[in-house]
Amino acid sequence: MQYYKSCMESRMGVCLDRRIAIEAADGLQKAEKVAESLHRSAELLKQKTCDAASRALEIIADALSISSYSEKLLEMKGESLCKLQKYDEAIKLCEQTLDFAEKNFALHDTKNTNDSVRLWRWRIMSKSYYHLGKLKAALDLIKKQEQVIFVNDGSGNESQKSLIPLGTTIRELLAHRKAGNKAFQSGKFAEALDHYNAAISKSVESQPFAAICFCNRAAAHQGLGQIIDAIADCSVAMALDENYAKAASRRATLHEMIRDYVDAVTDLKRLISLLENEAQEKAGSFSEVLRKARQRLSSVEEKAKSQIPLDLYLIL
């Protein structure tokens, strides 16, 4: 804006070429529009609501049509996508724009500039991976950010430093899950239960990871003979992650155990549907797991026809 104004207000005694004057006026208008878009988007994002993020995204898209490689606009777009829970899109945005940004800012030849190009992308990607339940991927990025902040004598901005508690949370979650799995494999079901409880209490913002913990806790409940609690945990896992095939399979097994064959059939049909969708996405043939699930469904359907009463003793 400053340079366009200087061009238009030139008092060098030289009459500006008409084409240059038009170009400067057009450039100034576009620059002012981008500046206004930056301000409006920043104000909307401060509201921290989905509606505000959605409106900000529209403004940002319009501004990016003028200033395609604006780091600030791209960063705010990433923040908006995260707020709208479009985590895969946020990750894709960061990955697709990083290479060009690094080459573009390499011209400045300053380490701090290159760090800033990577840091906000790593921050948004790590948050997205966390919400998608990909904790190890999130932690790898947080470690990179921590290293940069450490090298810069802790001079990271507030948004970067805010990831330190997230890194601590992720480490605790992974530790509890690992300890729970180890206890379960050793037959220490009550101890496994404690670790899964601790992980669940801290993983409310990462639904796919919480679903895994609920499904694992169901196995621990099963080991302790607490079948109804195990079924309830599988139900929560399936509610948190509707594509979680393992939870559907485990609940089907639990329903079979108490001779609830009708619900077991429902779970197996859901399992087969999930496996078929997965096979289509991977463009592969039906897996051995899918074949066995179909055989299992056929067997359970036969049992369901016999109207065998529930195992009330096992339920109690």
Image (cartoon, grey):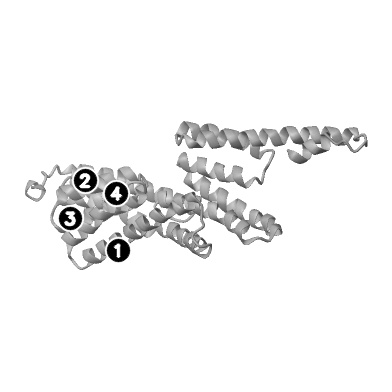
The image's mark for residue 232 is 2
SS for callout 4? helix
Query: Mark 4 vs mark 1: which is more N-terminal?
Result: 1
Q: Earlier in the sequence, mark 4 or mark 2?
A: 2
Q: Find disc 3 in the rendering and name its residue.
A: 222
In this rendering, the label closer to the viewer, 1 or 3: 1
Report whether residue 279 is seen.
no
Query: Residue tagged by mark 1?
Result: 178
Residue name at image x 25 percent, y 48 percent: 234
Of badges 4 and 2, the one in the foreground is 2
Label 3 secondary element: helix
- Spatial CA distance of label 4 from label 2 is 12 Å
Q: Is residue 205 left or right of residue 104?
A: left
Query: Cα distance, mark 1 to mark 3?
Result: 19 Å
Residue 223, given in percent of the width and then of the height, sits at: 16, 59
Sequence order check, earlier mark of 4 and 3: 3
